[in-house]
Image (cartoon, helix red, strand yellow):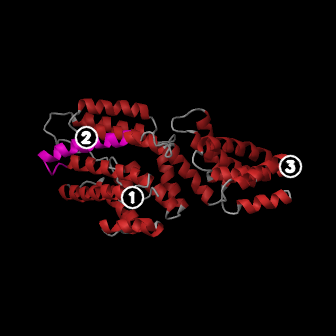
């Protein structure tokens, strides 16, 4: 449901010379771009230090505080079920909003303040939507969207603002059709236009200054999730990975395009890289990415009928799922337990197979998992 990003917009546009202080805006611009690259490279500790420096050297400009919050956002994004950093993120965004309000009290047409306040409202709304606080998310989204249009009126030449338009136009059209629960909130917003949104996002993805990477990531995800255009998703994924080869989110979506096509040999190439990076402790490649990588490598071996290797990786995925799944069994765990039963039948280890089939029956039903487990308890699975 996190795709309520109808109005949940990322803003990276920095305007030089807007403030009265005699700042070195070339240096400011260079620092901000370096920090943004560190965020996408998942060098989050380094990014924190970079934006601490921006805050210190440009204390009345909202950019440092905003992008400092973005390092927290990516920590949340890499482990979405962990809510321990939510309050910190909300507090950081509130600081940005307060600073922007002070600026706008003195100059209601200050473009930077409008952008960063809108961006803060967008990200706060995005996390509220992920946590299924729909009404609060919609309120933040409405205010953020108004700021987008207002800032465009002040500076219509800004390419980066079209990221906001693109996200809104696309998701306002697509999301209500896919998620009917969102429809009641759409009375707050203008009508969407999917094709227009795609064109705006593609324009920014090719020409944007600060929002180029974010636009490409949106195109990677929406082509995968909504358009079901795997070739187009891979096109943007390749562009992202050329510049940021160690971003697990970019890499995961790239690999999943092959999973969607049932092309596990190709998918396994990407997920083996993810698995190895997780083994080596690369930043961001946490147990969730390792669990997913193990699962899809196991699927590749299973399809190739190499039962012992498939079981090896499924057992790794199973162990990680048991550590990760706190509230209820994930699809990864349910499928893995069923597949391990089938694989141990193939390996003539019937006692182990029975143990796994019985466990499937204790887990919630997923697709026809219970029916299959009962069938294989009666008659061993033989490929």
Which residue does the image show at 51% across and 42% down from the upper left?
A: 245
Q: In the image shown, does 174 or 336 lie closer to the viewer?
A: 336
User: Secondary structure of the magenta portion, mostly?
Assistant: helix
Badge 1 local density, few (<14 within 10 Å), some, or many (20+)?
Answer: some
| The quarter of the displayed image where residue 25 is located | top left
Q: Which mark is residue 350?
A: 3
At numbered mark 1, what does the secondary structure look like: helix, strand or loop?
Answer: helix
Residue at mark 1: 134
For the residue pair 54 and 375, the one nearer the viewer reads as 375
Discs 3/1, front: 1
Q: Is 75 included in the stretch rendered in magenta?
A: no
Vertical side of 173 occupied by 8: above or below: above
Give the label on residue 62, or none: 2
For the residue labelled by badge 3, is the local secondary structure a helix, a strand or a loop?
Answer: helix
Q: What is the x, y in percent for residue 99?
A: 22, 41
Circles 3, 2 touching at the beta carbon (< 8 Å): no
Is label 1 in contact with label 2 (beta carbons under 8 Å)?
A: no
Q: Compared with residue 264, is residue 25 higher up or lower down, i.e. above or below?
A: above
Disc on res. 68: none
Front: mark 1 or 2: 1
Q: Can residue 17 be seen in this view?
A: yes
**Where does residue 372 sit, x and y in percent of width and height?**
76, 61
Q: Position of residue 186 (x, y in %)?
A: 35, 67
Q: In this view, does 174 lie above or below 253?
A: below
Q: What range of the chain is rendered magenta? A: 88-110
Mark 1–mark 2 distance (CA, rounded to whole Å): 27 Å
Left or right of 101, for residue 210: right
Q: Name the quadrant containing residue 370.
A: bottom right
Q: Which x, y percent locates residue 264?
A: 67, 54
Q: In this view, does 50 lie to the left or right of 83?
A: left
Residue 36 at least partly seen: no
SS type, badge 2: loop
């Amino acid at each position: 449901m996190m795709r309520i990003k109808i109005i949940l917009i990322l803003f990276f546009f920095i305007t030089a010379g807007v403030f009265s202080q005699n700042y070195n805006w070339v240096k400011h611009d260079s620092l901000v771009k370096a920090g943004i690259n560190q965020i996408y490279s998942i060098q989050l500790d380094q990014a924190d230090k970079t934006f601490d420096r921006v805050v210190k050297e440009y204390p009345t400009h909202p950019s440092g505080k905003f992008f400092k919050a973005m390092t927290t956002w990516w920590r949340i994004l890499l482990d979405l079920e962990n809510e321990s950093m939510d309050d910190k993120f909300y507090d950081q965004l509130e600081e940005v909003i307060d600073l922007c309000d002070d600026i706008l009290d003195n100059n209601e047409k200050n473009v930077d303040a409008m952008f960063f306040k809108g961006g803060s409202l967008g990200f706060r709304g995005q996390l509220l939507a992920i946590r299924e606080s729909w009404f609060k998310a919609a309120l933040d989204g409405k205010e953020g969207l108004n700021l987008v249009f207002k800032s465009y009126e002040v500076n219509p030449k800004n390419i980066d603002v079209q990221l906001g338009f693109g996200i809104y136009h696309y998701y306002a059209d697509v999301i209500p059709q896919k998620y009917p629960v969102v429809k009641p909130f759409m009375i707050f917003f203008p009508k969407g236009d999917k094709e227009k949104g795609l064109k705006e996002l593609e324009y920014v993805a090719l020409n944007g200054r600060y929002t180029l990477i974010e636009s490409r990531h949106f195109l990677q995800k929406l082509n995968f999730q909504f358009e079901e255009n795997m070739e187009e998703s891979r096109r943007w994924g390749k562009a992202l990975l050329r510049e940021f080869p160690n971003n697990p989110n970019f890499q995961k979506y790239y690999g999943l395009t092959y999973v969607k096509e049932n092309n596990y040999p190709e998918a396994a190439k990407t997920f083996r890289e993810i698995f190895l990076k997780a083994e080596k402790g690369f930043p961001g490649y946490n147990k969730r990415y390792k669990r997913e990588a193990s699962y899809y490598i196991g699927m590749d071996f299973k399809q190739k009928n190499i039962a012992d290797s498939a079981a090896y990786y499924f057992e790794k995925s199973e162990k990680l799922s048991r550590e990760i799944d706190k509230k209820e069994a994930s699809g990864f765990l349910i499928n893995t337990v069923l597949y391990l039963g089938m694989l141990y039948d193939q390996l003539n280890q019937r006692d182990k197979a029975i143990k796994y089939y019985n466990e499937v029956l204790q887990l919630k039903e997923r697709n026809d998992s219970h029916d299959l487990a009962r069938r294989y308890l009666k008659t061993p699975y033989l490929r």
